[in-house]
């Protein structure tokens, strides 16, 4: 069904008792044209664009837990495209373009809010680095501007810019079209739209093996609900990509780390934008519920524990309290960890693998949420045609052999 | 926060005294110019990343300053053994196989 003012009104009059399920929950068929492993934002977006732009609807998205329950539900929802290298600029700006109309496209309010992302500079090195980023972005036609400490204070009044801070704010790079979106709504919107076009989303169905035919090509996946045949399998499993790919005997240049985030008790709106500080490892925005959403760093060691150590979040809160003295007496409501798959060059891997019919979209590390629409869009092209999308071509697995790395220093600071 | 036993100092100390050094037992090819791109790439970039017992390097930066190796379960974060650099990876008993 289509959401509209009329449908909202008629359901309100009916006590909201008649809303149908937003997506089907079918049992898996014996085989599909393609199977996507992982029903997070990236996997669901992939299925959506395969159905919508390629007409491929005989597709299943297989999920070990519940859809959007992994890193899609564990991030800090920040959207920006101010990356340094041309390859990164292209893919993140592609996503930024899709974010603008995503709610209309999906007929689902993903609550994209272009409230501005401000990245603080604290010393001369930061200033030179960020100015380089601003110039690179402007050459590529990407929104990014350099502002003074005073302008930063005007843009975000709770920010303390006094020169007596241990790490004073000396300026900032501001991307006004950056902002936040509602993470769950992104997964739900893509799931609903893909399901309506015939994509099967199979939750609580863990992949336990990848079956290959005598030629070595992919024949399908073994799951907790039995074997599902497919000539094409796309692995979009974030922190668990290494373990899934190992089922096909493919080693990955990935390491999985816990990345923490936390939210405060809800307060009235006072934080008008997203503020990030790479130098002192803190970023913060305010959700529409009023909670301050704070991102901490990764643990020092690889882990699958989805927790993260307390001293990591303490370190971040020290920085937050220094930058925003007004929040010092707030209590933290919840903290959690997501398992992020980090590549050696902090750029994603999108494309073919040494196994015929097996494709992978991974390595988004600590910053995958912002790329969700673009990632799904280019990976749908790869799965449909067997060839990388021009934007995704530089992000091949093969770059670690050829040496054409995309060493992205503008990835979130927590990845470095 | 982990409590890590440094095998040289023979004491259990908090994680912040140490620095993680990545996967253990990764040997640099003896003659780098003799290996092909795939083997060199494997040495530089590809890691086991196991969900289970991992062998990893740690350095006791705020203690003796020396590197050692550690077996840790990456699901529970429980440390199963620490041993000096250069020593072979220990085989775990029933506790480690848990």
Image (cartoon, coloured by chain):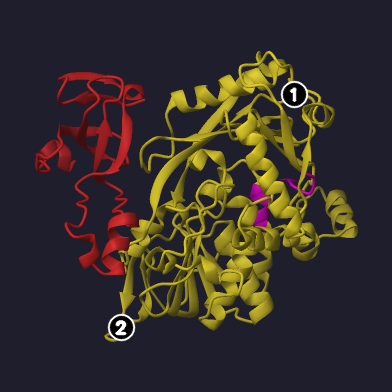
Chain colours: A yellow, B red
- The residues colored magenta run A175-188
Residue A184 in the magenta stretch? The answer is yes
Q: Earlier in the sequence, mark 2 or mark 1?
A: 1
- A321 horizontally vs A104: left or right: left
Q: Is residue A69 visible?
A: no
Task: Please state the horizontal and vertical placement of residue B25, each as a whole percent of the image.
Answer: 19, 47
Q: Chain of mark 1?
A: A
Q: Tag 1's secondary structure? A: loop
Residue at 59% from the left image edge and 75% from the top image edge: A389
Give the answer, above or below, for where A346 lies relative to A395: above
Q: Which residue is mark 1?
A: A159
Up-down: is A215 above or below A167?
A: below
Q: Is any part of residue A5 visible from this angle?
A: yes
Provide residue A409's location: percent of width, then percent of height. Answer: 55, 47
Q: Nearer the viewer, residue B16 or A50?
A: B16
- Residue under label 2, please give it: A213
């Amino acid at each position: 069904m289509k959401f509209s003012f009329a449908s909202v009104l008629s359901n309100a009059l009916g006590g909201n008792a008649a809303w149908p399920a937003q997506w089907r929950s079918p049992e898996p068929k014996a085989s599909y044209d393609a199977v996507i492993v992982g029903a997070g934002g990236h996997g669901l977006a992939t299925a959506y664009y395969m159905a919508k732009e390629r007409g491929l609807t005989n597709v299943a998205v297989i999920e070990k837990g519940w859809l959007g329950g992994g890193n899609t539900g564990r991030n800090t929802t920040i959207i920006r495209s101010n990356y340094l290298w041309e390859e990164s600029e292209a893919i993140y700006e592609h996503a930024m373009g899709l974010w603008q109309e995503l709610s209309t496209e999906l007929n689902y309010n993903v609550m994209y809010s272009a409230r501005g992302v401000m990245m603080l500079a604290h010393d001369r090195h930061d200033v030179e680095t960020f100015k380089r980023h601003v110039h690179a972005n402007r050459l590529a036609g990407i929104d990014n501007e350099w502002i003074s400490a005073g302008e930063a204070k005007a843009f975000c009044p709770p920010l303390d810019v006094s020169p007596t801070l241990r790490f004073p704010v000396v300026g900032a790079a501001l991307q006004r079209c950056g902002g936040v979106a509602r993470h769950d709504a992104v997964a739900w919107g893509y799931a609903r739209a893909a399901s309506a076009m015939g994509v099967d989303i199979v939750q609580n169905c863990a992949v336990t093996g990848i079956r290959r035919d005598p030629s070595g090509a992919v024949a399908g996946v073994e799951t907790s609900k039995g074997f599902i045949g497919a000539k094409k399998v796309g692995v979009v499993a974030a922190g668990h990509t290494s373990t899934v790919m190992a089922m096909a005997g493919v080693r990955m240049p990935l390491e999985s780390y816990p990345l923490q985030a936390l939210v405060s008790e809800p307060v009235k709106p006072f934080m008008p934008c997203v503020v990030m500080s790479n130098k002192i490892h803190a970023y913060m925005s305010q959700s529409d519920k009023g909670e301050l959403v704070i991102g901490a760093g990764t643990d020092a060691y690889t882990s699958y524990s989805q927790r993260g150590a307390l001293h990591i979040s303490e370190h971040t809160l020290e920085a937050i309290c220094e930058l925003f003295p007004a929040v010092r007496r707030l209590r933290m409501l919840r903290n959690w960890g997501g398992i992020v798959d980090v590549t050696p060059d902090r750029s994603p891997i999108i494309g073919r693998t040494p196994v015929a019919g097996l494709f992978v979209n991974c390595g988004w590390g600590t910053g995958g949420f912002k790329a969700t629409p673009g990632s799904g869009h280019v990976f749908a092209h790869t799965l449909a045609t067997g060839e990388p999308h021009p934007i995704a071509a530089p992000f091949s697995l093969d770059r670690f052999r050829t040496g054409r790395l995309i060493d992205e220093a503008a990835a979130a600071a927590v990845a470095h | 926060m982990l409590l890590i036993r440094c095998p040289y100092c023979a004491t259990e100390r908090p994680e912040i005294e140490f620095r993680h050094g990545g996967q253990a037992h990764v040997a640099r090819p003896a003659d780098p110019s003799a290996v092909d791109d795939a083997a060199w790439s494997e040495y530089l970039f590809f890691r086991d990343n196991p969900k289970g017992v991992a062998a990893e390097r740690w350095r006791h930066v705020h203690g003796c300053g020396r590197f050692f190796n550690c077996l840790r379960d990456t699901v529970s974060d429980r440390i199963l053994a620490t041993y000096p650099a250069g020593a072979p990876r220990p085989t775990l008993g029933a506790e480690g196989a848990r």
